[in-house]
Image (tube, coloured by chain):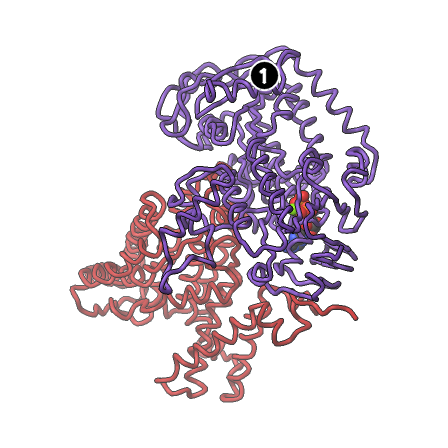
Chain colours: A red, B purple
Amino acid sequence: MTTLLRHRLFWPAAVLVVLLASNLIFSNNFFTITLQDGHLYGSLIDILRRSAPLVLVALGMTLVIATGGIDLSVGSVMAISGALACLLIGDLSNPDAVGPVLLVVGAAIALCLVFGLWNGFLVAVLGIQPIIATLILMVAGRGVAQLITGGQILNVRSEPYRVIGAGYFLAVPVSFLIAAAAVALTVALTRRTALGLLLESVGGSPTASRLAGIRSRRITIMVYVFAAAFAGVAGLIYSSDVSSADSNAAGNLIELNAILAVVLGGTALTGGRFSIAGSVLGAVIITTLDITAVSVGVPVETTLLFKAVVVIVLCLAQSATFRAKVFGRFGTRRAEVPA
Amino acid sequence: MAEQLKMTGIKKVFPGVVALDDVDFRLLPGEIHALMGENGAGKSTLIKVLTGVYDIDGGEIELAGQKVRFTGPLQAQQAGISTVYQEVNLCPNLSVAENIFIGREPRKFGRIHWPEMRRRARASLARLDLDIDVTAQLDSYSLAIQQMVAIARATDIGTTKVLILDEPTSSLDASEVEQLFTIMRRLKADGVAILFVSHFLDQVYEVADRMTVLRNGRLIGEFRTDELPQMQLVSKMIGKELEALEQIEEHARETTVAERGTPIVEARELGRTGAIAPFSLTIHAGEVVGLAGLLGSGRTELARLLFGADRPDHGELLIDGRPHAVKAPRDAMAEGIAFSSENRRTEGIIGELTVRENMILAMQAARGWTRPIPRRKQDELVEQYIKALQIRPADPERLVRDLSGGNQQKVLLARWLITEPRLLIIDEPTRGIDVGAKAEIQRLVAQLADGGMAVLFVSAELEEVLRLSHKIEVLRDRRLVEELENGDDVDADRIMQTIAGGATT
Ligand SMILES: Nc1ncnc2c1ncn2[C@@H]1O[C@H](COP(=O)(O)OP(=O)(O)OP(=O)(O)O)[C@@H](O)[C@H]1O
Ligand SMILES: [Mg+2]
């Protein structure tokens, strides 16, 4: 029991369960999943589908944070990738052909890679503090996206493009499949190779890592490229879902949600040890919160407040010191003096 | 005499380790009391429990007859206990003066009185015979100076009743140690109770009046220094007789006549402005080269140039006879050069990783991230070195930051030994390591050299350098001033002469 309580992911998982359960009170078919027209439907499926962009962004953010950095530009990168994709699709002679749309998707992601390199260059080569370095693109990126769309909302009609964010494959939402694949890829990349260890080492102590012969510069660049690429895919999912590119709305505030997801998942902002499973859980919690707020009927004005309260509760639950103060015997630090 | 400090039945348990088990400890006013024990015996833990860094799991603390229980170091300090912890814990990005006065800044009209603060900082450093720029950022100074600053801070507090020094001398050399002892004796005369931890037995016998010995978290006993001969002390600490230790010394001496292999590294007029003047030095396979010199003489700087930790701006470096641009540590590593830094906390271990991960880090870095070391191989290597270096607790999955200082040092050494280098550069490898393990490491170095590895050995301890080295390089004022073949005619006095030479004449 205590080992379960001590598990890093215990509290986030518990909060998620409570959130889901409280939904049940308000809509008693919350857990029902039905098959309609060959598609799975239901609130749970909806949560998975809507979590996809945040999960993607949180994955990249996890790696960046593990190295002791932070990436504020992910939202803007999302906007850029959606904008470029919609612009190019608009120029296609046949927007319903799969091949050209795939090329467009490739181009959008390639552009994001370039922006990732830029962030990595500023941080690793020029040594600019990550928060400042990525702030540049966070601000300028929206401008770039607006340049691409000509300051308007670009609407597109393309069946293959729509599949990314709103389609289904074998009854499962495609966006969910993409996110799941990204999670699997990240896990394989960090835990099957030595990348995870080296990342944690760089985040734990950059100087010591350099003296141990780790190419910390290269690794740092790599994580920013990752973050941008995943943000790019998230941008495509978002824009495909609404069949348009909106440079202001796309990825708005997602960097904060992603950072929150990472922290909820138990990765410290100071870098070092990271948990991919934790970040995914964190992202799902945040999305569930948003959906719960609606289904419970929290008035729109107070949604943010509601969210903040849940987050505070979770953070307190995760703090060993707080638990020790409240529950005493669960505490790890302050043990009772035996009589 | 009434005890200034009395701890009874102290117990402290960490997950999986009983760090202190029913330990009694007392400190009289006006005495210097040494706390002795092997690495991991629980010395630092006892200190941290006392000053409130850790909560107590059992037992009582009395300060001047009053029961106390501190919730943090600040509270302990306000109660008159000032402490220098084993790992220097000052603020690296504040100035020296700020570090000395942080939390008790001299004020005028409610605002910090900067000139006064600088003046007093200079004065308190002067007492330690240290004349440095107190407005410079702390981390622009070497570890030894940082340690002196920490000592200055602790000894400057006028209201101190109990002074605690956890391995304060580990990076100091003879003259600084003398300065420290002078101050300690003066404070002792003023009635301050001083607790002193050191693995240098000579130092302990020089200053301490009494000592308390711990082994494996248990109290072995309290003794008067003049009643406990050194050999008996050691056997109390390690719990067995000491023959093994003596054998090692014999062995190391013999190897000084080894024949010389091929040159591995040759520095030609290599130098870096402001760090070390151009020097020439050849290191052969199977050779142990010792670097001797005072603190700040450029020992570490020289070593770092050979490893590419800093870039030279003068001269060239030949590896296997060919000029080589060593731009970064990994270039040096590719040539089989390893470097274990003196500063294990900031340049060595990575606290939040496990013992296993720390040990394989350099090897893994050399292989690159795409070729992870198979887990079986990792476990084998790690087990082998935990055994060879007697790392305790012998648990590869424990976080390194939870190990005692000396054991962390061993982990760092293991990281480099695992890479099987051709040239091993070790800067203060025995810092904070207990007598038994120190002998063990010295034997290891001798053994490795016999096996053909070249070793560049940096140590503030002259005895150690003399015992191990075939060749001794003497540095003074950031300059390599003399190279000595180690032989019967070379002794500590001879080297001290060179080190001091020029300074007086
Ligand atoms: N924060 C911690 N968490 C878990 N175990 C710890 C922690 N701190 C110390 N220990 C363990 O407690 C024991 C005593 O450690 P301590 O640091 O007191 O040793 P020490 O006598 O100071 O040794 P050294 O001479 O190497 O500094 C060791 O086994 C160590 O691994
Ligand atoms: Mg210690």
* Location of residue A86 in the rendering, given as x and y in whole percent from the top left corner: 24, 63
Q: Amino acid at mark 1?
A: Arg
Q: Residue visible at 74% across and 63% down?
A: B60
Measured along the vertical axis of the image, is residue B393 above or below residue B304? below
The answer to which quarter of the image holds residue B493 is: top right
The answer to which quarter of the image holds residue A84 is: bottom left
Residue B395 is left or right of residue B361, and the answer is right
Residue sitting nearer the eye, B416 or B270: B270
Residue B147 is left or right of residue B49, and the answer is left
| Chain under numbered label 1 | B
Q: How many marks?
A: 1
* Location of residue B130 in the rendering, given as x and y in whole percent from the top left corner: 47, 37
Which residue in the structure is indicated by mark 1? B494
Measured along the vertical axis of the image, is residue A196 above or below residue B319? below
Residue sitting nearer the eye, A53 or A40: A53
Q: Residue visible at 40% across and 52% down?
A: B117
Q: Quadrant of the C terminus of chain A?
A: bottom right
* Location of residue A327 in the rendering, given as x and y in whole percent from the top left corner: 64, 76
Measured along the vertical axis of the image, is residue A158 above or below residue B118? below
The answer to whether residue A175 shows anywhere in this view is: no
